[in-house]
Image (cartoon, rainbow, N blue to C red):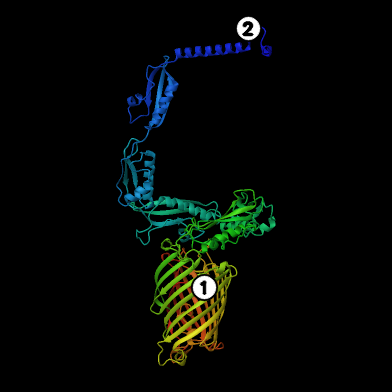
Amino acid sequence: MQMHRYQRADSPLGWRGNVALALLLVLGALDLAMLKAQATRPKVSDIRVIGNRLQPSETILAKLQTRVGREFSPELLGQDVRELYASRAFARVWADREDDGQGGVRILLHVKEYPSLIRSVVFRGNVHVSKDELESLIGPNIRPGGHCNPAANRAACQRIIQKYYDEGRIYAACFLESGSQETDTEVIFNITEGPKVYIRSIQFTGNSFVSSDVLRQRINTQAMMLGWRIMGQYNPTMVEYDVGELTRYYRSYGYHDVRVSREIRHSPDSRTVDVIFHINEGVRYKLEKAPEVIGAKSLATEALESLTKHKPDQYYDQRTIDADVARITDYYGYTGRQARVHPEATFIKEKPGLMRVAYQVEEPRQPALVGSIVIIGNERTADNVILRQLPLYPGQTLSFPDLRQAERNLARLNIFEMSPDGSVRPTVTVRDDPFNPDSPFKQVVVNVQETSTGSLMFGAGVNSDQGLTGSIVLNERNFDLFRVPTSFEDLLSGNAFRGAGQEFRLEAVPGTLLQRYMATFREPFLFDSPYSLTVSGYFFQRFFNEYNEDRLGGRVTLGRRLDDRWQVSVTARAEDVKVHGVSAFAPQDYQRVIGNNFLAGVRAGVNYDTRDNLLRPTEGLMADLSYEQIFGDQVYPLVNFELSKFWTVTQRADGSGRQVLAFHHNLGWAGTNTPVYERFFGGGFRSIRGFQFRGVGPQENGFKTGGTFMFMNSLEYQVPLRANDQIFAVAFVDSGTVSSRIDDWETYRVTAGFGLRFTVPMLGPVPIALDFGFPIVKGRFDDRQVFNFWMGFTR
């Protein structure tokens, strides 16, 4: 047969027989090895249980199949370990073996038991902090039914102490009366509260850069006010934080070697302390030369260096450095490159007090383009309300500065959540295309968190011109005129009439001399265009010395903001003006308008505004010019021009405490047919101080009849009296005239005076003004009033 070709000639069994014989020999050898191993397997001489506290060792040993005196089996021991762990009586089980020196095996069985269950949590000694506060402080894991965790209990004790420290109880203590062992079934926090410690005074030594009053505005620690122990609690952690704040403050103005330390002086009764910050200012560094730009590749270095404003031989100023970085970053950003700019400071050893600053630039590989725009978080607000605030469109070069502008635009809508520290706010970020990370097209992500946009406000006010007034305002900032409710649930959920970014306002202002009732609707982006539409209906009632006036009417304004400075508008109004309460001895100017008077007007206006702040400007200009043509029972024009200019004359070394010179001008002209209720009057806070409201102007038989020409000027100097810039002294000179002819300058009034400006934080940013004006030049029939009081915007 063919198969015999592969059989060896000297083998009688053939190749198959040889293979079978080999297998038998191998199996036989294995059996002999196993028999030998069994014959020499050691016996278990001892089993020790380690780590058990709750369960006796005997109970654990009884659960094992491995026993003393039996042969040791690794497989059986492994099974015992697995079964003990599976019983869920232990958090961990493992075993070790060791020779006992006599041929046997000693087994060490390690177990880690679960901690005891907590039956109760007790607080002792707490009086000024409630049990509920303490329970929220220690956390949800320390509670009845949970496992006793000594480390967590000790950490909770430290949190309790910190809570008392934050409230000024620096002698507070807390120790675990029970709960420091895993076997404890009760957690007892024994608390010693101790008295509150107050800061009697805060002092500074070694400071010459700015005054101590200014430094007090840079720290969070506060002293008692007038000895009242309602504020000024001593918090050691806060004091340590303020040491760092002062250090950062000084370094931002070039004092890079500054050293700040603190000293605490306790009173004899340990109830008050004096906090002293010791400041070693050191040298204030100047720049040896203008900052350099390093690492620029796609843009010319010279062009980037021309953007820097920090000049040689100027003191180092972090504000200027930050502004330089922002300008360079924006310059790149407009080209679609999100460059990173890092300022690097170098101190010159051979030239003490001099340093160099270089801006290190890291450029991206390629410009970015706008891909898709994703909006997150707008459950109620329509997408177009958000998209129209973004100056970005898919496909265009991604201008990174426009991202920040978009964030500012969204924040200005005042319909999204904004936290005081800025941690919660509308954000516009960029991320790579998730499907193609290397693509130049980037995804723009808008993240908003909607907030409550409706409000009902109550208030009261008083001033020299309007008397005592109350205020009730219902306002909705995210109104939608066409989102009518489709169900009762739609009304309850708050979705009805909301989401289009419109504004609706109802206002009622009853008062002693003035009453105003108004409803206003405003669409800031009419048909998603840059035009705004405002429609209002109103009823005014005002009681003057000469007569009473009721105005019932409405107005429609179409506006357009051209850029950040220029704005234009067109307004149409229609009113019914009712004049009543006129004396029988009043001049004809009043007699002829008694009763109802109809007027309709069209006004065109332009506004230019560069002021740095609307409440208290320190720089900039505001100019407003308008022309209105009136039709109706009388036909006449009205022209108004208002100008305000502000200059910062001097300021503190850190830029605060600005002394401001302000100039105000108001020019008005009206046609000869203008009725008395539309004419100009002078006097009062917003006009010429030192005279009564409407106490300046032409008169007839003791009745003020108003003028058709007004020319007013005011020069005011403001000086801060406190380091927090919340109280200012002002000195002013007001002048002007109100007459029936443009060429009538015979009675040009001049007053001088002084006053105070207060900003009370609890009343919001609205300032309070107190002024004393003294006429220097006045008309024969003018009505004087030395004191003027005003709460609100001050022009």
Q: Position of residue 510 (x, y in %)?
A: 39, 76
Q: Quadrant of residue 596?
A: bottom left
Q: Position of residue 71 (x, y in %)?
A: 41, 17
Q: Residues within 10 Å of mark 2 (few under 14, many from 20)?
A: few
Q: Horizontal placement of 350 versus 154: left or right?
A: right
In the rendered view, tell whether residue 123 sits above or below residue 661.
above
Determine the CA span between mark 1 and mark 2: 117 Å
Residue to which mark 1 is pinned: 534
Q: Secondary structure at mark 2?
A: loop
Q: Residue furthest front?
A: 1
Residue type marked 1: Thr
**Nearest to viewer (mark 1 / mark 2):** 2
Q: Which is more N-terminal, label 2 or label 1?
A: 2
Q: Position of residue 504 (x, y in %)?
A: 47, 69
Q: Secondary structure at mark 1?
A: strand
Residue 748 in view in this figure: no
Residue 735 in view in this figure: yes
In the rendered view, tell whether residue 401 sits above or below residue 180.
below
Residue nearest the viewer, comparing 267 with 773? 773
Residue nearest the viewer, comparing 586 with 417? 417
Residue nearest the viewer, comparing 396 with 152? 396
Q: Residues within 10 Å of mark 1 (few under 14, many from 20)?
A: some
Residue type marked 2: Pro
Q: Which mark is residue 147?
A: none
Q: Horizontal placement of 514 versus 610: left or right?
A: left
Residue to which mark 2 is pinned: 12
- Given contact means CB atoms under 8 Å apart, are the residues at marks 1 and 2 in contact? no
Q: Position of residue 21 (x, y in %)?
A: 58, 11
Q: Quadrant of the N terminus?
A: top right
Total numbered labels: 2
